[in-house]
Image (tube, coloured by chain):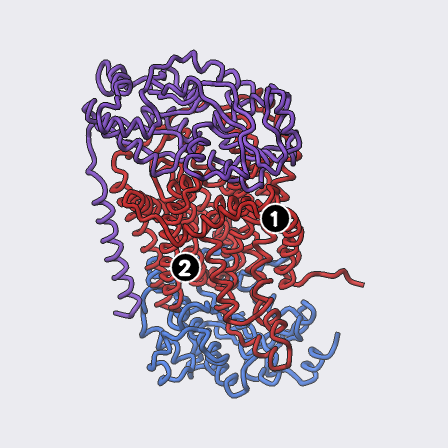
């Protein structure tokens, strides 16, 4: 994986995309092989390094009982000490940073001003939750972003908007979201043109790994039909 | 053909089967010989004694009881939460440590839980003498272990994925636990913790053993001498306090908060619990000043191996254990099964209100009084004991059930009613069904309590563990006491293993 | 932030504080001087116990010039343990509990008893519907076999220990009662009530308690009657801890004994105390008087 690279992870349901991402993230242990990040094995990596890897989970994993602001701030817990973590539970800490991240995640500025930060998570719609999770990811300021089907349950307009936030590059070639590299698993082969590289999985096996612009529709249909 | 597997709501109704044999035995033994005493008892309710001496004694007793309850409640919450967190698998896993110490500690905690607070009181009295803190410790020890179990179970059964997500993002485990699990546990702490205060009050009342002159001493002695008018003075005061407490707790629960508010409320609750504990301490010092003469250890001869062996051959093991098990199973069946059956009979708000009042009465009447009242119009039998403990605990279970049901939205019930199901069926499927797993979990904890409470009705006579324990204690036969307590521990541990197994078998997946 | 809840909480705090203060006001201030703590086994109603020992405490306090406090205890073994651990200095014990206490507390002495305690009796009572005839000799107790029978409290001398002993002499064990066991009503009054109701067909109670119940009209003679009166045995007595002379000055135990034995009906308060004890005078007692009870206690496993 290279700096600035955007990778799409494709495969049918159950092909092992989520598993691969969880292994890459270190929350699952692989039976063979090893995941390395900046030269260090992910299992033995100190916490300081681990916070460089951010994950956007398929079911978001927001804490339902907390407010939007507290959830967004929980992305930054890795960078702060315990006292800050406790303060986050009792006060609205770093509101401006929170609002900034929510805005970057594409939430309506109006809505944010009207006290979205204090709203409980369970009052939000599906799309809004997705964005709060994204804002949390941005708040973490990770070097590597792993996203597990971030747009599976979204309507096409919101989905493309969300991908914009993650994938768009500045004219200098930097990713707008601040990460150095990004891996996203998808169910929408029609979107692969927005990526640099495509990895295909089939029943846990790697069956395809090529630049996105060399991909043919035949390759894709093979990936989704065979087996 | 697949085996029939009872669904959760059915499992909540099935224990009510215990009522059948109990009621048959009670019905055949019914007689009217005690009517005149019942009459005296009931007329005492209308004319409680207002003698200044009695009022003064009750007022003083109330102070001691409240102070003891507050302090022991506060301590049990504090230690319960700490111990519960230490013996939760998820906490050890967060630090990527092996979980066997948690498992070991959990098993160990069954021991303080297996012994009734009355017995803890008598045991501590042996080595510390009469001291207010002995009463406090007698309640705080088993209650801490009980709170620890509930806390641990909730921690381990909560959704751990947000926690794992935070940990994999490099968050400090403690910080991650506080952020991901703490908010959910807040609700548990506040509803369960509040409920524990009521339990602590009941226990402090039951414990009149400590020479503190608590309300329990008044109730027990007036009951023993059948001074019903004086008894009612104490009972009415107890009722007033329980009602007040319940209303305060309801007011507190009504306003649930999320986000920052929720967390602040939780902090406030924790602070309040500690402050109330401190108040309890000073209160006790104020009421019984000359009994705070330093806590000193007074040794007791530990029974030798040969004494233990001798006692083991003397004890009637089979009838003792069988009777206790029978009593526990029947009483637990009544306690768990009666509330849902009663509510199902007629699912209307008015009837449910009636039930709620009935259950409040059941919680209010101390088990020894209930036993005596039942015994006055019935022949002595195991069924009487089971009925007394079962009814008393059904009051507790009924309250938990109603509270859980009230917290549900009722949309499912409406949906079922909309497709034409009868009132009962829509209540059963729409309201009881989602509530069943947690109700059954509380039922399992309650069975623990019931096993311990068999000590209280030991007086019905017989060969049960409870009676044997009281008899051995009153003969100062320590070898037998040790053996009976071991037996209680073994029963508690196996009961817990069984209920865990059942839960994983029936309630999950 | 002044939502209604905070207001309620503040009110609650005020109420709590007021309660605390009023609680404190009902109690005398703490005293630094050593206090003589007297106690008793709980064999009466609490009101009577409080009056009896409250009066006695003030009387002893006046005559001995030391603070005396009555500490109520609500069960028999707890009184024994409290005495052993030094939480109670002077206790009015029953026959069995007194022996248990003295065996567990080396050096403890018997101070006094009442005249009736030297020759105490229990009575066996029966519900009239049980068809039990008055018993002439001890062998007649055999007729109780197969009946529902209840004792009083487990540690009671007159409600359990001696009745069980006499039953054993007649060859009746608790296993031979209906249900294979005897009940334990918890107190003499409860035994009377339960036998009168018919739940138990027969029971054993202390004779003085029975007489008081008859006098107060609490007994329906058509439903419950005495079928046998036991031979006499020793019962209640004052027991005192061995270390009082060290704590209160030389000769204190003797002074205490004199004070108790010196209670006379001539003095108004002392008369009330003696009436509450249902005694004319306290008389001195010897350890040896309780030897038979100790033997019975050992036979029946109540003394180890």
Q: Of helix, strand and loop, which one carries label 1?
A: loop
A45 to the left or right of B210 = right
Chain seen in blue? A
Q: Quadrant of the N terminus of chain B?
A: bottom right
As drawn, the residue found furthest toward the front would be C222
Structural crowding at the residue carrying mark 2, measured as other residues with C-alpha within 10 Å and reported as few (<14), some (14–19) or many (≥20): some
Residue C210 % position (x, y): 46, 31
Q: Is residue C2 visible?
A: yes
Residue B85 visible, this angle: no
Chain of the residue under the numbered disc 1 shown in the image: B
Work out whether residue B173 or residue B60 is closer to the camera in this orientation and state it: B60
**Residue B415 locus on image (x, y percent):** 59, 79
Measured from the top left, where is residue B63 in percent x and y? 31, 46
Where disc 2 sits, the SS reads helix
Which corner quadrant holds the C terminus of chain B?
A: bottom right
Identify the mark nearer the N-term, 2 or 1: 1
**Who's the residue at 50% across and 30% down the image?**
C205
> Mark 2 or mark 1, which is nearer to you?
1
Mark identifier at residue B190 = 2
Q: Colour of chain C?
A: purple
- Same chain for labels 2 and 1? Say yes or no: yes
- To which quarter of the image does residue B479 belong? top right
* Residue farthest bottom in this picture: A157
- Chain coloured red in this rendering: B
- Which x, y percent locates residue C184? 53, 34
| Label 1 sits on residue | B30
Nearest the eye: B286 or A79: B286
**Residue at 58%, 42% in the rendered image:** B493
Q: CA distance from mark 2 to mark 1?
A: 43 Å
- In the image shown, does B282 or A50 lie closer to the viewer? B282
Figure check: B368 above or below A2: above
Point out which mark residue C100 bears. Answer: none
């Amino acid at each position: 994986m290279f700096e600035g690279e955007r990778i799409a992870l494709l495969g049918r349901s159950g092909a092992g995309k989520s598993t691969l991402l969880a292994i890459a993230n270190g929350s699952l242990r692989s039976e063979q092989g090893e995941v390395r990040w900046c030269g260090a094995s992910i299992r033995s990596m100190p916490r300081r390094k681990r916070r460089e890897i951010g994950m956007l989970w398929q079911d978001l994993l927001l804490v339902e009982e907390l407010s939007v602001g507290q959830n967004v701030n929980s992305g930054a817990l890795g960078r702060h000490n315990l006292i800050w973590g406790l303060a986050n539970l009792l006060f609205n800490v770093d509101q401006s940073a929170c609002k900034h991240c929510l805005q970057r995640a594409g939430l309506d500025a109006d809505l944010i001003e009207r006290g979205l930060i204090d709203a409980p998570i369970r009052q939000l719609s599906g799309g809004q939750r997705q964005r709060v999770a994204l804002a949390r990811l941005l708040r973490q300021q990770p070097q590597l972003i792993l996203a597990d089907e971030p747009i599976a349950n979204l309507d096409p307009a919101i989905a493309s908007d969300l991908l914009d936030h993650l994938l768009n590059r500045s004219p200098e070639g930097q990713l707008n979201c601040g990460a150095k590299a990004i891996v996203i698993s998808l169910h929408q082969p029609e979107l692969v043109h927005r990526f640099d590289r495509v990895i295909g999985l089939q029943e846990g096996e790697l069956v395809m790994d090529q630049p996105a612009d060399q991909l043919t529709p035949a390759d894709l249909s093979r990936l989704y039909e065979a087996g | 053909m697949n085996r029939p597997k009872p669904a959760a709501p059915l499992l909540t109704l099935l224990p009510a089967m215990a009522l059948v044999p109990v009621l048959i035995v009670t019905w055949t033994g019914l007689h009217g010989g005690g009517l005149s005493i019942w009459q005296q008892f009931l007329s005492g309710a209308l004319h409680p004694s207002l003698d200044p001496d009695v009022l003064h004694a009750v007022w003083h007793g109330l102070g001691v009881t409240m102070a003891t309850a507050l302090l022991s409640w506060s301590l049990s919450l504090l230690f319960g939460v700490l111990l519960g967190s230490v013996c939760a698998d998820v906490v050890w896993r967060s630090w990527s440590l092996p979980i066997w110490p948690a498992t070991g500690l959990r098993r160990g905690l069954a021991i303080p839980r297996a012994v009734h607070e009355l017995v803890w009181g008598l045991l501590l009295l042996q080595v510390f003498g009469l001291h207010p803190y002995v009463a406090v410790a007698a309640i705080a020890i088993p209650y801490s272990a009980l709170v620890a179990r509930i806390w641990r179970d909730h921690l381990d059964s909560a959704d751990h994925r947000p926690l794992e997500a935070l940990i994999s993002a490099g968050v400090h485990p403690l910080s991650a636990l506080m952020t991901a699990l703490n908010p959910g546990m807040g609700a548990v702490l506040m509803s369960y913790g509040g409920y524990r205060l009521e339990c602590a009050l009941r226990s402090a009342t039951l414990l009149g053993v400590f020479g503190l002159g608590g309300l329990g001493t008044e109730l027990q002695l007036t009951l023993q001498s059948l001074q019903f008018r004086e008894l009612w003075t104490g009972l009415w005061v107890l009722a007033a306090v329980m009602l007040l407490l319940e209303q305060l707790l309801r007011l507190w629960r009504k306003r649930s908060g999320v986000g920052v508010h929720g967390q602040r409320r939780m902090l406030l609750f924790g602070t309040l619990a500690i402050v109330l504990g401190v108040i309890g301490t000073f209160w006790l010092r104020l009421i019984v000043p000359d009994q705070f003469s330093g806590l000193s250890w007074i040794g007791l001869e530990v029974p030798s191996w040969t004494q233990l062996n001798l006692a083991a051959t003397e004890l009637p093991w089979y009838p003792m254990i069988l009777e206790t098990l029978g009593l526990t199973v029947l009483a637990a069946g009544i306690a768990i099964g009666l509330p849902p059956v009663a509510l199902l009979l007629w699912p209307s708000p008015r009837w449910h209100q009636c039930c709620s009042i009935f259950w409040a009465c059941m919680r209010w009447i101390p088990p020894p009084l209930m036993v005596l009242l039942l015994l006055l119009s019935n022949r002595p039998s195991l069924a009487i004991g089971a009925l007394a403990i079962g009814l008393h605990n059904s009051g507790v279970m009924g309250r938990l059930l109603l509270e859980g049901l009230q917290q549900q939205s009722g949309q499912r019930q409406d949906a079922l009613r909309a497709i034409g199901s009868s009132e009962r069926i829509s209540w059963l499927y729409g309201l009881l069904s989602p509530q069943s797993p947690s109700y059954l979990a509380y039922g399992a904890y309650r069975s623990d309590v019931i096993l311990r409470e068999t000590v209280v009705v030991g007086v019905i006579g017989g060969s049960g563990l409870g009676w044997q324990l009281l008899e051995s204690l009153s003969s100062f036969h320590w070898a037998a006491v040790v053996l009976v307590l071991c037996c209680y521990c073994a029963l508690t541990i196996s009961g817990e293993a069984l209920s865990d197994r059942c839960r994983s078998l029936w309630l999950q997946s | 932030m002044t939502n209604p809840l905070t207001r309620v909480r503040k009110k609650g705090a005020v109420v709590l504080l007021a309660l605390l203060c009023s609680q404190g006001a009902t109690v005398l201030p703490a005293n630094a001087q050593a206090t003589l703590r007297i106690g008793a086994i709980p064999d009466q109603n609490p009101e009577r116990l409080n009056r009896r020992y409250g009066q006695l405490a003030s009387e002893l306090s006046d005559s001995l010039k030391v603070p005396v406090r009555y500490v109520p205890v609500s069960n028999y073994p707890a009184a024994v343990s409290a005495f052993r651990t030094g939480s109670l200095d002077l206790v009015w014990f029953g026959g069995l509990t007194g022996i248990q206490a003295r065996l567990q507390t080396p050096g403890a002495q018997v101070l006094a008893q009442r005249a009736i305690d030297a020759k105490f009796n229990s009575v066996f009572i029966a519900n009239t519907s049980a068809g039990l005839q008055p018993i002439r000799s001890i062998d007649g107790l055999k007729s109780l076999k197969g009946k529902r029978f209840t004792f009083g409290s487990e540690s009671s001398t007159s409600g359990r220990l001696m009745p069980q002993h006499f039953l054993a002499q007649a060859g009746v064990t608790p296993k031979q009662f209906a249900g294979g066991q005897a009940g334990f009503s918890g107190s003499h009054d409860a035994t009377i009530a339960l036998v009168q109701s018919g739940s138990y067909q027969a029971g054993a109670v202390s004779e003085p308690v029975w007489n008081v119940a008859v006098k107060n009209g609490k007994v329906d003679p058509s439903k419950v009657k005495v079928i046998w009166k036991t031979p006499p045995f020793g019962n209640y007595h004052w027991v005192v801890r061995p270390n009082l002379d060290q704590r209160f000055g030389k000769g204190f135990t003797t002074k205490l004994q004199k004070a108790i034995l010196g209670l006379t009906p001539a003095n108004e308060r002392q008369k009330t105390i003696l009436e509450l004890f249902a005694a004319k005078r306290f008389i001195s007692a010897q350890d040896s008087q309780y030897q038979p009870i100790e033997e019975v206690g050992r036979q029946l496993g109540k003394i180890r």
